[in-house]
Amino acid sequence: MPFCEVRCAYCDFNTYAGLQALMPAYVRALCREVEMIGESAPEKLAVHTVFFGGGTPSLLPVSAVKRILDTVAAAFELLPDCELTLEANPGTVDFEQLAGLHAAGINRISFGVQSANAHELKLLDRLHTFAQAQTAVHNARRAGFARLSLDVMFGLPYQTMAEWQHTLHAVLALNPDHLSVYALILEHGTPMQAAVTNGQLPLPDSDLAADMYEWASSLLAQHGWHQYEISNWARPQTAPESPMQQCRHNLQYWRNLPYLGFGAGAHGFAGGARYSNALAPQAFIKRMQAAQPRPFPASPACVQRTEVSAAVEMNDTLLMGMRLTDEGVSAKTFEARFGTSLDAQFGGKLRALQDRGLVDWTPERARITPGGRLLANMVFTEFI
């Protein structure tokens, strides 16, 4: 959903401000893409997660979200416990909209809160206030959402440890079920990166950012939160039989398992290929209007398709799986999937990383160490 009211200063996603007039045509094109890929699949595919990402999906009318979900349900087999997530800006939703989204079938909401400090929200070009975020969380619970995720950011220009601690304490007080805790990355081409390059903003202190990450990890552990990925935590279980609140959709990415991407700039991995769609919403709409069927999993909007070799898929599985701090990459699962062992394929690299204290490698699994989390890119690059 590539629509935003304002493009945030740090964002390098495929998003566009001021194109909301395209939404009706875009939704029609998107639904057509879902139908076409569903029809081209070798069988009616079972789906265990649906994720509306952006951009700002909460700018869509509830009727449009319902139409898309109905189209997905017709094209695929939605499993009974399907996780259906929608990302939302806290300043773009009210109780009626949230209640409508819940009634339409969305059962997990993800709010981009980012900070509890007004000056940091302004620095990031966020349109909401923290008071609006508090209200949005309250309204989401009233609307019936039992699964609620919040995003926060650290390592910002000028940010102090005290300000970061205030944000995390304030967010925990909202009693979410899931937290995504991200370090700011100065992406090339973003206004914030340009401001740092031009000396208008200071370069964030990477040592302080590391301290912020370690403090957050310690605090969340003290409160019983389960860190299952480098930047993601799930709320402690209230009872042994209660489900973990991990994001099942993102687990599919990190396990390097197939997923389908729909819409402008969407990426997918299915049928042994990675593919991506045209970036601009106008180009996406035009391509889908002149719809000529393409072999699964591509649609007429696809502009790039790359067949994935077994060697690349094995490397990708290690690269992504190392993000999973607890699960890592299972030796048994890897061998069942690829017909070769972790040791045979990556033994030398894993031993070298283990010797440097970055990876914990046992007969059962390979996973990143707590110390390795701060140097994760040194691990990931070994598998590119």
Image (spheres, rainbow, N blue to C red):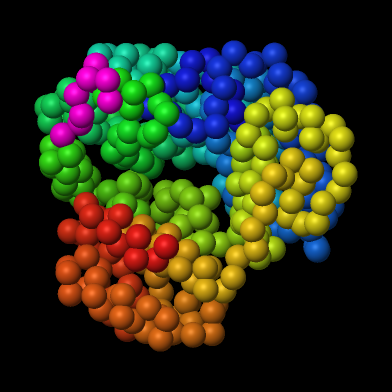
- Magenta-drawn stretch contains 199: yes
Q: Residue 267: percent from the left, percent from the top?
A: 60, 46
In the image, residue 223 sits, relative to residue 344, either above or below, namely: above
**Residue in view at x 50 percent, y 55 percent:** 253
- The picture quadrant where one finds residue 40 is bottom right
In the image, residue 144 sits, relative to residue 334, either above or below, namely: above
Look at the image and tell me whether residue 248 can be seen.
Answer: no
**How many labels, in total?**
0
**Residue in view at x 69 percent, y 63 percent:** 271
- Compared across the picture, whether 107 is left or right of 320 comes to right
Q: Quadrant of the N terminus?
A: top right
Q: Residue 34: percent from the left, percent from the top?
A: 76, 43
Q: Main secondary structure of the magenta part?
A: loop
- Magenta-drawn stretch contains 212: no
Q: Residue 139: percent from the left, percent from the top?
A: 47, 21
Q: Residue furthest front?
A: 198
- Compared across the picture, whether 201 is left or right of 179 comes to left
Q: Residue 238: percent from the left, percent from the top?
A: 34, 49
**Residue in view at x 32 percent, y 47 percent:** 231
- The picture quadrant where one finds residue 368 is bottom left
**Residue in view at x 53 percent, y 68 percent:** 313
In the image, residue 302 sits, relative to residue 42, either above or below, namely: above
Towards the viewer: 21 or 68: 21
In the image, residue 368 sits, relative to residue 333, either above or below, namely: above
Look at the image and tell me whether residue 371 can be seen.
Answer: yes
Chain part drawn in magenta? 197-205
Q: Quadrant of the C terminus?
A: bottom left
- Compared across the picture, whether 292 is left or right of 252 comes to right
